[in-house]
Image: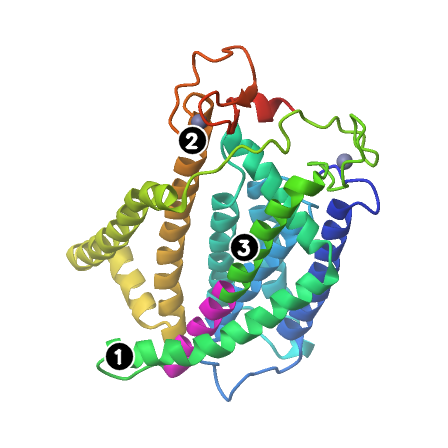
Amino acid sequence: MVDPAPRGTPSWRATRNARVAFCVMAAASAVATHWPRLAIAPGESPVDKLAHACNFAFLAMLLWRTRWIRGIPVLMGVMAAWATLDELTQAIPVLHRQADLEDWLADLAGIAVASAFIAAFRPMGQGLGALFARRRACALDGLLANGIAWFHLTTAAALGAAAGAPLGVLADSWFQRKAPQPWQYGFIGAVLGAGVASHALLESGIRWRMRRNVAVRPCLACGTPHAGSAACAACGRTHGEFDWCDAVGLEGREEGRLCVRPIALGISAVIVLNFAVIALLTSLRLHVDAVMRFDRWFAGLPTDARILADATGVALVGAWALAQCRRRIADALDRGGARCLRCGFDLQATAPGDPGGRCPECGTGFVRVGDAARH
Ligand SMILES: [Zn+2]
Ligand SMILES: [Zn+2]
């Protein structure tokens, strides 16, 4: 468990809200997976596996926000144990449900994708990169401390889902020459729409709050506004000299340039992996019995399970590319301690021992590598 911020501070309230949301969702999920004889449609639902994966991905992300768990491997272990228990308890005869290996694999796929994105969004960098990550976390806590923000995010997700579902069906019928799969691609479109809409709202909220916080100067550990003393009145952390210095970030164009290579690599990786798996399966199928059995098992899976397998592969590569983009941006920010990010002035010669200061050429604040990590 991460040391909780003192009661009543914005960080504490953000964590409490996440815990409430998690408990509500966990209870709803347990009821839905154990409700006797629940079936969405007659026979197997066309989006059953996708729903399984999304449910556990969402629960994993909420559980991470509760700060009950420190470390992504522990999160994955806890969620995998939960998924196992969830499937096994469905075998209780009175419920008329059944434990299902494929459902369990779908749960694990969701947990893997959620964990990969949590890892991709973790704080990176040491100097200015780490400082910006702390400011970002502080702004996010400030947002999520308000119950109304959770309501807005839910509304945005619902609107995004409503817009995404028909787009998903449209995209599928455009690319698919035979037998369109309106259920599966409608579902995927809805999930992507919900994700994009809520993320866009969250991101704009974080950016707005980060700008506002430069004036409010809250404590970076608990979010309590700076009362003018050297230490935070709520949690006792000493305010860092550079916590709210006016160091600039990278321009959007520069961030885009740094992301070109990871995105291109990610797209090539998806294409190469796709052909590699097909080539491997076709060449080994007739020689290795296990490969033949796997191929038959996979071909016999319901459509949404096969779509989920593909989507999981693409999502994991996407999370890797995202992590690379963020890493490159954090490294570029850290280099701002040696060369001014705004005017390019060489700062190495200026006050070499100082953890930070102002560029003598343009007056922009800078922070050196290691400074933000020390506070
Ligand atoms: Zn504090
Ligand atoms: Zn400068």
Q: Which residue is mark 2?
A: 341
Q: Is mark 2 within 8 Å of ligand 2?
A: yes
Looking at the rendering, the stretch of residues picked out in magenta corresponds to 182-196
Location of the C terminus (image quadrant): top right
Residue drawn at point x = 63 percent, y = 79 percent: 96
Q: Nearer the viewer, mark 3 or mark 2?
A: 2
Q: Quadrant of residue 165?
A: bottom left
Q: Is residue 302 visible?
A: no
Residue drawn at point x = 68 percent, y = 55 percent: 144
Tag on residue 203? Answer: 3
User: Which amino acid does the dot numbered 1 rest on?
Assistant: Trp
Q: Is residue 183 magenta?
A: yes
Rendered-image quarter of ligand 1? top right
Name the one closer to the observer, 83 or 290: 83
Say whether residue 343 is left or right of residue 266.
right
Q: Which residue is mark 1?
A: 174
Q: Is residue 287 visible?
A: yes
Spot occupied by residue 369 in the image (x, y as percentages of width and height): 50, 22
User: Which amino acid does the dot numbered 2 rest on?
Assistant: Leu
Q: State the separation of the CA atoms marked 3 and 2.
A: 23 Å
Residue 102, relative to residue 243: is it above or below? below
Spot occupied by residue 126 in the image (x, y as percentages of width and height): 52, 27
Q: Residues within 10 Å of mark 2 (few under 14, many from 20)?
A: many
Residue drawn at point x = 68 percent, y = 48 percent: 141
